[in-house]
Amino acid sequence: QVQLVESGGGLVQAGGSLRLSCAASGRTFAIRTVGWYRQVPGKQRELVASISSGGTTNYSDSVKGRFTISRDNAKNTVYLQMNSLKPEDTAVYYCNTIAQIWSWGQGTQVIVSS
């Protein structure tokens, strides 16, 4: 069973930056398309960025041009560089495969103050 550990969240002012990391156990990480999701209370978890095993990336319109997803398969880790943060980016951020086949980690809280 793959375990996910997200880190790197925190409190930042609008316009600031954060870099999130998600470390995955297990041997199948490298072949999976992995995504970063975020969730705010009362709303469904939404996919904001994904990266395929070959490095192809996709972003939601709300983060395009501000967030960058990357991965290091040797470290079983996926990253999310978040720049020009806005208060509406405040959420708990999680990683998982696109098919959400892994158990969810604890997430990492991002709070953007105005």
Image (tube, rainbow, N blue to C red):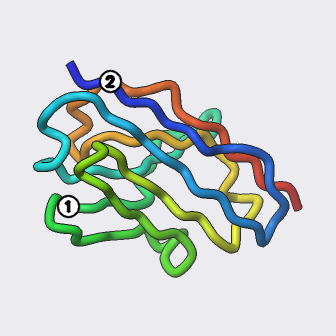
Identify the residue at the far bottom of this view.
Answer: 65
| Disc 1 secondary structure class | loop
In the image, residue 78 lies at what x, y percent? 37, 51
Residue 19 percent coordinates (x, y): 58, 56
**Considering depth in this image, is 86 or 17 the residue closer to the camera?**
17
The residue pinned by badge 1 equals 52
In the rendered image, residue 100, in percent from the top left (x then y), is placed at 26, 37
- Which residue is nearer to you in this view: 36 or 25? 25
Is mark 2 in CB contact (under 8 Å) with mark 1?
no
In the rendered image, the vertical position of residue 37 relative to residue 65, given as above or below: above
Asked if residue 52 lies left or right of residue 89, the reply is left
Residue picked out by circle 2: 3
Taking the spot 32% from the left edge, 24% from the top edge, the residue there is: 3
Residue neighbourhood size for the residue with mark 1, other residues' Cα within 10 Å, grouped as few (<14), some (14–19), many (≥20): some
SS for callout 2: loop
Looking at the image, the residue that sits furthest to the right is 114
Q: Residue at x 54, y 43 (%)?
A: 93
Q: Which mark is residue 5?
A: none
User: Sequence order check: which comes first, mark 2 or mark 1?
Assistant: 2
Task: State the quadrant of the C terminus.
Answer: bottom right
Q: Of 39 and 85, which appears nearest the observer?
A: 85
Residue found at x 73% / y 44%: 10
Location of the N terminus by quadrant is top left
Say what amino acid the circle numbered 1 marks: Ser
What is the number of callouts on the image? 2
Type of residue at label 2? Gln
Q: Quadrant of residue 86?
A: bottom right
Compared with 103, 71 (above or below) is below
